[in-house]
Image (spheres, rainbow, N blue to C red):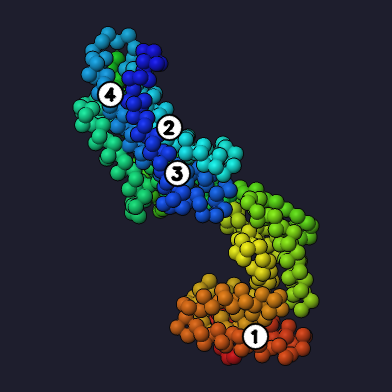
């Protein structure tokens, strides 16, 4: 059959107003008006992998469901035309491939069109690794088309097509609501998300391919008619066993991810300036435009605390945590939320300086991550009094008190604790500089003794 004839007879063409309308409507209205996904200023909108995933999120359910429905329709059309009763000049696979190719192309456009629109809208390059989820979606579309085609061979297309369209959409779209089991949403790409600087891991991309592809492959093997019965039975049994094995392993793997398929972070580009310390920020939007002021604020804060007697060494490098998750600071390299701290106050450096000040406060132990984990909750008074003293020396006490005030809401006597912290930090101001450092060291040591239960609980 000629390409033109094949296209004109395919349901993919005459349903184009439907699926193309869905794409344009949901992209323009859903992502920009209803959810505000593409209108809120976020770091993810400057990262192609994040933009691609969010641009296509709405359309997987439609693409998969319509692929199955159109696959069933094409199978019914071939059956009604008596194609299967003709002399086998072409294999059944070739006939099926010819009928399903327009369907797969059309449904793939449901993912490709919003991807292209989003990359153009935000001026991002089509990063090959960022486009891999779309390629996976195309493979799953092929699988749904094959499954729908198999259903259409046995069920009248007037029944199979609408049922597959509605049922397929419901099956895929509502997987995102499943907390347990979580594997349907992870496999059918309804929970794909990547932070700025992250890509989906290879495992997250491979699992949907193995699950859907193995099932579709087993169904396709079932169409075989030419080999002897024994060989045909062996091939079908082998394909079914492989499909069961791969789909089970894939589901178990995806279920272990809970509601967050794995990603690989740390790929965000940086812009750096200066030496000792060399300060680096995420290279997106206008955050890095503040890089000279950020570096100046960081250096002045550390220098100011050194003059106050705080024992801190200027780090060799200070890097931005934006797009770099799971990083841990060392004496020589600090990781601070520079981009978020700049954006937080419209370009002001107060929160940048606050982050640097808190980085200089080192305790001789590891403090509990929450109040309830401490042996003696009163440790927080000594620990926070020391931090408040440092914050006041750096001129950033307001950000510290604002943050701690919100944390103290977890405590029944939060206001009392805050007043005690401020009292202890204020009382030391009358001492000499040398005595203030002695007091600062004593407060940190006492906080550790109380938190770990290794000493007395006196004031």
Please give the name of the residue rendered at 76% of the width and 74% of the height, measured from the top-left corner: 304
Estimate the x, y position of residue 326 in percent, counting from the top left.
Answer: 58, 57
Please give the name of the residue rendered at 55% of the width and 42% of the height, measured from the top-left corner: 121
Quadrant where the N terminus is found in the figure: top left
Spatial CA distance of label 1 from label 2 is 63 Å
Mark 4 / mark 1, whichever is N-terminal: 4
Quadrant where the C terminus is found in the figure: bottom right
Question: Quick one: SS at disc 3?
Answer: helix
Estimate the x, y position of residue 56 in percent, counting from the top left.
Answer: 45, 42
Q: What residue sits right under mark 1 in the picture?
A: 425
Q: Is residue 252 above or below residue 113?
A: below
Q: What residue sits right under mark 3 in the picture?
A: 28
Nearer to us of marks 2 and 3 is: 3
Nearer to us of marks 3 and 4 is: 3
Spatial CA distance of label 3 from label 4 is 34 Å
Q: What residue sits right under mark 2 in the picture?
A: 108
Q: What residue sits right under mark 4 in the picture?
A: 75
Please give the name of the residue rendered at 74% of the width and 90% of the height, measured from the top-left corner: 431
Question: Quick one: SS at disc 1?
Answer: helix
Question: Quick one: SS at disc 2?
Answer: helix
Frontmost residue, 266 versus 74: 74
Is 300 situated left or right of 134 in this image?
right
Spatial CA distance of label 3 from label 1 is 54 Å
Mark 3 / mark 1, whichever is N-terminal: 3
């Amino acid at each position: 059959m000629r390409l033109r004839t094949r296209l004109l007879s395919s349901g993919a063409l005459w349903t184009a107003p439907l699926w193309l309308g869905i794409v344009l409507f949901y992209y323009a209205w859903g992502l920009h008006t209803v959810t505000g996904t593409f209108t809120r200023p976020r770091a993810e909108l400057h990262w192609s992998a994040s933009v691609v995933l969010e641009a296509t999120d709405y359309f997987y359910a439609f693409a998969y469901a319509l692929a199955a429905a159109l696959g069933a329709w094409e199978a019914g059309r071939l059956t009604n035309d008596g194609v299967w009763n003709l002399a086998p000049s072409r294999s059944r696979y070739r006939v099926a491939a010819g009928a399903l190719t327009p369907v797969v192309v059309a449904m793939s456009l449901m993912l490709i069109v919003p991807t292209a629109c989003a990359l153009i809208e935000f001026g991002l390059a089509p990063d090959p690794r960022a486009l891999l989820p779309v390629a996976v979606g195309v493979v799953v579309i092929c699988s749904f088309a094959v499954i729908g085609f198999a259903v259409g061979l046995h069920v009248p297309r007037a029944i199979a097509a609408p049922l597959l369209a509605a049922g397929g959409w419901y099956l895929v779209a509502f997987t995102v609501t499943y907390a347990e089991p979580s594997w349907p949403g992870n496999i059918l790409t309804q929970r794909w998300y990547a932070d700025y600087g992250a890509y989906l891991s290879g495992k997250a991309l491979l699992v949907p391919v193995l699950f859907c592809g193995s099932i579709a492959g087993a169904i396709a093997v079932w169409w075989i008619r030419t080999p002897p019965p024994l060989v045909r039975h062996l091939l079908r049994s082998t394909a079914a066993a492989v499909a069961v094995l791969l789909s089970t392993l894939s589901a178990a793997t995806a279920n272990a991810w809970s509601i967050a398929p794995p990603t690989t972070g740390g790929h965000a580009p940086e812009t750096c300036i200066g030496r000792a310390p060399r300060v680096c920020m995420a290279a997106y939007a206008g955050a890095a435009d503040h890089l000279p002021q950020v570096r100046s604020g960081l250096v002045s804060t550390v220098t100011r605390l050194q003059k106050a007697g705080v024992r801190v060494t200027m780090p060799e490098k200070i890097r931005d945590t934006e797009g770099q998750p799971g990083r841990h600071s060392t004496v020589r390299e600090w990781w601070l939320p520079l981009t978020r701290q700049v954006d937080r106050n419209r370009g002001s450096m107060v929160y940048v300086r606050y982050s640097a000040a808190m980085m200089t406060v080192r305790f001789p132990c590891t403090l509990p991550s929450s109040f309830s984990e401490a042996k003696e909750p009163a440790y927080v008074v000594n620990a926070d009094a020391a931090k408040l003293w440092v914050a006041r020396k750096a001129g950033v006490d307001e950000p510290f008190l604002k943050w701690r005030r919100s944390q103290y809401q977890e405590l029944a006597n939060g206001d009392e604790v805050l007043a005690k912290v401020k009292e202890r930090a204020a009382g030391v101001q009358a001492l000499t500089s040398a005595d203030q450092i002695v007091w600062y060291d004593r407060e940190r040591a006492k906080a550790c003794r109380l938190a770990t239960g290794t000493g007395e609980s006196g004031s």
